[in-house]
Amino acid sequence: MHIEIIDAQNRGRNYNYLIACPETKEALAVDPIAVDACLNIANERGWKITHIVNTHEHIDHTGGNEAMREATDAKLCAHYLAPINNVDIKLHGDHSLQIGNTVKFEVLDTPGHTLSHICLFAYDLNDVPHLFTGDMLFNAGCGNCLHGGDVDKLYESFSEQFERLPDETHIYPGHDYIDNNLRFAQSVEPHNPHIKGLQDKLLTHPRPYVSTLHVERLVNPFFREDSNEIEASLRAKGFELPLEQVRRKDIFLALRELRNSW
Ligand SMILES: [Zn+2]
C-alpha cells in the first residue's frame, strides 16, 4: 500500500492520511480535514479516493467530510454508533475494509477517547503492519477522555486491542503531539534512556516521524505501567495507589489524570 501523511498545518496539529492500492489506484482518506491538500496529492499520484474513514466523531476529524464527498463521491465510513451525518458504511470491530485489490484493513473497535472510536490495522505487501490510531494512541501518549470519552474503556482498549499487535507495527496518529508527550513521559520516568534518545533523534529526524509499537512500548508511559519509576513518580505527586499489588490499570488511570492537568 502507498501511504501519504498530510500535515493539516492547523492549530490542532492534525495529520490526515491517504492510503492507496498500488494496482487499482483506489484510495482511502482518513479524517481528511485538509481537503484541498488531500485532493491535490491524490491528483498528483493519479489516485481516486473511494472511501473516507472517520476514526471518531470530533469535528477536527469530520469537518472535511462534505467537501470531500462532493469532490470525490467517496463512501463515508465510521463506527456504527458514531454521531456523524451521512455515514454510508457503519463499521463494527469484526469488520474489514477493502481498498482496491491489495489493501485490506482490520477494523478495531477502540472506545475510550470517545465511545465510537475505531483504529485501522493492515499489513502491506511486504508484510509490514500499519496502524492508524486516530485520537486513541499518540506518539508517546494517548487521547484524553474529556469530550465524550470513558477512561475505563480507554484502558481496556489499550490493554486488549494493542497488546496483541506486533512490535514492528508502524503508528499513524491523528495529531502530532510527540514533543510535548515526550516531555510528559520524561517528567514521570526521568531515568528512561529511550525517552532522551528519541528526543535527541528528533532534533535532526525529518518530520513527520513514524514510530513503531516497539518504540511506543519503550517510551510511551501508557504502555509502561510496570515501570517502578512511574509508580514512584505518581506516589510522589500524591496519587493514592494501593500499597501492595498495584494493578496496571491503577497506574494507567493515574497517568491519564495527571496528564489531563499537566
Ligand atoms: Zn478527538
Image (spheres, grey):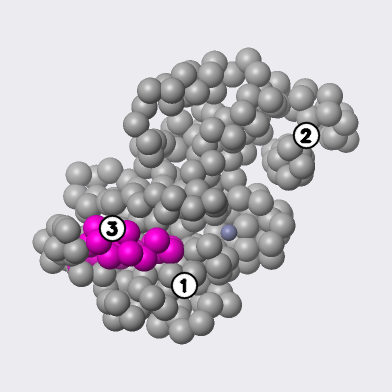
Tag 1 secondary structure: strand
Residue visible at 52% across and 27% down in the picture: 218
Using residue 86 as the reference point, say whether residue 113 is left or right of it: right
**Badge 3 or badge 2: first in the primary sequence:** 3
Asked if residue 31 lies in the magenta stretch, the reply is: yes
Residue visible at 77% across and 42% down in the picture: 261
Towards the viewer: 125 or 21: 21
**Badge 1 or badge 2: first in the primary sequence:** 1
Res 78 label: 1
Asked if residue 62 lies in the magenta stretch, the reply is: no
Question: Which x, y percent locates residue 183?
Answer: 61, 28
Question: Which x, y percent locates residue 60?
Answer: 53, 62
Report ligand 1 position as a quadrant.
Answer: bottom right
Quadrant of residue 19 in the image? bottom left
Image: magenta residue range: 26-42
Label 1, label 2: how far apart the Cα atoms are: 36 Å
Q: Residues within 10 Å of mark 1 (few under 14, many from 20)?
A: many
